[in-house]
Image: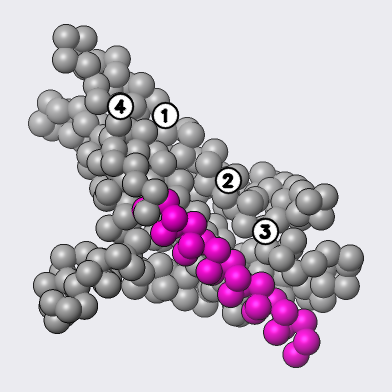
Amino acid sequence: MANIYQIFKKEFRSYVNSPAAYIFIIVFLVLTSWIFFRGFFLINQAVLRDFFSLTPWLFLFFIPAVSMRLWAEEKKLGTLEILMTLPIKDHEAVLGKFFAAFALLTVTIALTFPLPLTLVTISDPNIGVDMGPIVGGYLGMLLLGAAYLAIGLFASSLTENQIVAFIVGVTLSFVLFIIGEPIVLFSIPSALVPVFDFLGLGTHFENISRGVIDTRDIVYYLSVIAFFLFLNIRSVERRKWA
């Protein structure tokens, strides 16, 4: 655990000292705030539905941009060999990097809390606000974001080029997200629909964001995260013995 914390501290400090992290946070907050207040000013309706429905698509590009450097930069700078000679196990290095990126994601998501607070403040006190979809939406954002991070971290372990890592991360995340969407389900044999529907990252996010906290959705996301972290560990092991 101490080694994981040391890797976490090193990677999170690099985020804090990097302008790229602040650009990511600011751009994400500007876009999500625009999505929320666009509905408020244009149609006089303050809801978080658009915010939660469009966030997965924003994550699809922002999160691979955050994770693309985690291994690729180590390879390009030649520091991966130094890291692997330290008394640190492969899974500790992978988990430390993952938790650092997840911490940045959590901070970013937490900074959007003024949006639901605004919704609660301006809502009719006689009607109130249904907190179920709000809680579910934020939980879904954390789980979906963590899944994207695990995928992006694996993509970063495959190359020393950050742009290539970004493209691979976006592609893998997009495929896993889109396979459960209606546009795909309507074009495949009916026998495969339940399988594709279950495998889609977006399907489970939609379930949770409606306020329906089903353990099957949570287990699914945890399984995806664990699977890609496992692939990441194997990728690092192969690199070490190459």
Residue at 21% x, 78% y is 192
| Magenta region includes residue 235 | yes
Image x and y of residue 187, in percent: 13, 78
| Secondary structure at numbered mark 2 | helix
Please rate how many residues cluster around mark 4, counting C-alpha atoms within 10 Å: few if below 14, some from 14 to 19, many from 20.
few
Residue to which mark 1 is pinned: 113
| Residue lying furthest top | 126
Q: Which numbered disc, 2 or 3, marks the residue closer to the eye?
A: 3
Q: Which numbered disc, 4 or 2, marks the residue closer to the eye?
A: 4
Residue to which mark 4 is pinned: 131
Residue to which mark 2 is pinned: 104
Question: CA separation, marks 2 and 3?
Answer: 14 Å
Q: Which numbered disc, 3 or 1, marks the residue closer to the eye?
A: 3
| Quadrant of the image occupied by residue 88 | bottom right
Identify the amino acid type marked 4.
Met
Q: Are marks 3 and 4 in contact (CB under 8 Å)?
A: no
148 w.r.t. 158: above or below: above
Residue to which mark 3 is pinned: 95
| Secondary structure at numbered mark 4 | helix
| Quadrant of the image occupied by residue 193 | bottom left
Magenta stretch: helix, strand or loop mostly: helix
Identify the amino acid type marked 1.
Phe
Numbered range of the magenta stretch? 217-242
Question: CA separation, marks 3 and 1?
Answer: 27 Å
Name which of mark 2 and mark 1 comes first in the sequence. 2
Q: Are marks 2 and 1 in contact (CB under 8 Å)?
A: no
Question: CA separation, marks 4 and 1?
Answer: 13 Å
| Secondary structure at numbered mark 3 | helix
Name which of mark 4 and mark 1 comes first in the sequence. 1
| In this picture, residue 177 sits left or right of residue 169 | left
